[in-house]
Image (cartoon, rainbow, N blue to C red):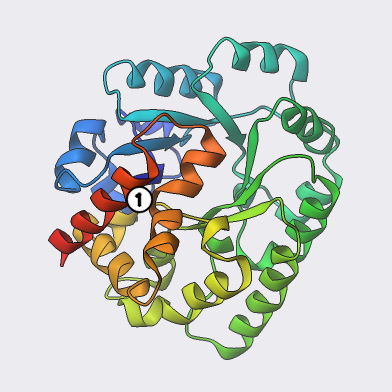
């Protein structure tokens, strides 16, 4: 199984201002060995995603991979107010970096940032030309702008993180989310991470609470355009890693073996160009892993 969305850090308050007083559980170190213990050995490969807005974060995650071979790809941070050519050169010198993202959700006006920020919209075509993935981190309220952004930039993979952070428990919100996700599904270069849902749904959320949203992206995008990620350790705000695995099993129990293999390994392998087990071996490990997770 490949976990396509993990954060690692050595906690220092000044470097993680987004971790507030209500997130005390996150105010500690989270490293690959902690993830492997939490997952009970079920993770074969990991994709580390930036949690700090600095190039030092990119180098830190690449260096961390030197100590843990299962950390096979990094989604780093890109400074869209900075010089593009120099940053692309730095990325070429760090081949483990397979893509970038920016914390668009934290901008004062995320929709305006997507639509009008010149640095972002000039740099993303160059990232795509270099076969680098760009991950779109937005909340449901900014889906219209995210759709326009994805329509504009179509030369390489774009990944919508956390299924665009849907609002749970509201029929009108679901209709709004579903409409825009369906429009995104019409763009073949757009993929979606099935990740972060438990945190959005809140403490005590069950697989049943998530089922309608997961069924929707499965039907709209197909399993071959979905990636599973834990969003660990942020997910620990509401759920344990074993909870996430159990939910993942329950949410996909009607899927075929090949569809589950796509979600839990094959799509990530393709998109991030990972060097892991063969499809056949990996499918067997994935299903054995979930059998144990029950």
* Count of numbered circles on the image: 1
Residue matched to label 1: 234
The residue under the point 67% across, 11% down is 89
Residue 190 rendering spot, x and y as whole percentages: 68, 53
- Tag 1: Cα neighbours inside 10 Å, few (<14), some, or many (≥20)? some
Q: Secondary structure at mark 1?
A: helix
Q: Up-down: is 117 above or below 99? A: below
- From what the image shows, is residue 182 above or below residue 238? below
Q: Is residue 6 left or right of residue 215?
A: left
Q: Is residue 131 visible?
A: yes
Q: Position of residue 157 (x, y in %)?
A: 67, 43
Residue plotted at (65% across, 31% down):
132
Choose between 222 and 161: the one closer to the eye: 222
Q: Nearer the viewer, residue 13 or 154?
A: 154
Report the side of 192 relative to 151 (left or right): left
Give me the residue at 23% from left, 55% from top.
Answer: 241
| Residue positioned 47% across, 85% down in the render | 169
Residue 201, image quadrant: bottom left
Residue 29, how many percent across, how many down? 24, 33
Q: Quadrant of residue 127?
A: top right
Front residue (pair 150, 114): 150
Compare residues 292 and 173 and report the one nearer the observer. 292
Left or right? Give the position of 8 relative to 117: left
Which quadrant of the figure contains the C terminus?
Answer: bottom left
**Can the viewer see residue 1?**
no
């Amino acid at each position: 199984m490949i976990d396509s969305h993990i954060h690692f850090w050595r906690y220092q308050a000044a470097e993680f201002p987004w971790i507030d007083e209500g997130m005390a559980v996150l105010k500690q170190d989270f490293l690959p060995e902690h993830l492997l213990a939490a997952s009970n050995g079920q993770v074969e490969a990991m994709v580390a995603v930036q949690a700090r807005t600095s190039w030092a974060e990119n180098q830190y995650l690449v260096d961390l991979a030197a100590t843990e071979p299962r950390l096979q790809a990094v989604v780093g941070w890109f400074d869209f107010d900075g010089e593009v050519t120099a940053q692309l050169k730095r990325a070429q010198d760090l081949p483990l970096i397979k893509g970038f993202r920016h914390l668009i959700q934290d901008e004062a006006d995320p929709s305006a940032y997507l639509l009008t920020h010149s640095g972002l919209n000039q740099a993303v075509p160059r990232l795509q030309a270099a076969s680098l993935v760009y991950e779109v981190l937005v909340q449901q309220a900014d889906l219209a702008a995210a759709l326009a952004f994805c329509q504009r930039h179509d030369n390489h993979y774009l990944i919508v993180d956390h299924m665009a952070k849907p609002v749970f428990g509201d029929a009108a919100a679901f209709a709004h989310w579903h409409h825009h996700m369906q429009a995104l599904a019409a763009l073949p270069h757009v993929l979606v991470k099935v990740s972060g849902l438990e945190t959005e749904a809140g403490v005590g959320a069950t697989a049943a609470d998530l089922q309608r949203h997961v069924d929707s992206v499965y039907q709209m995008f197909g399993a071959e355009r979905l990636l599973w990620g834990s969003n660990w350790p942020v997910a620990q705000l509401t759920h344990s890693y074993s909870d996430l695995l159990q939910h993942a099993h329950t949410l996909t129990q009607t899927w075929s073996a090949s569809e589950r293999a796509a979600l839990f390994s094959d799509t990530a392998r393709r998109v991030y160009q990972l060097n892991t087990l063969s499809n056949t071996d990996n499918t067997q490990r994935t299903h054995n892993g979930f059998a144990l997770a029950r």
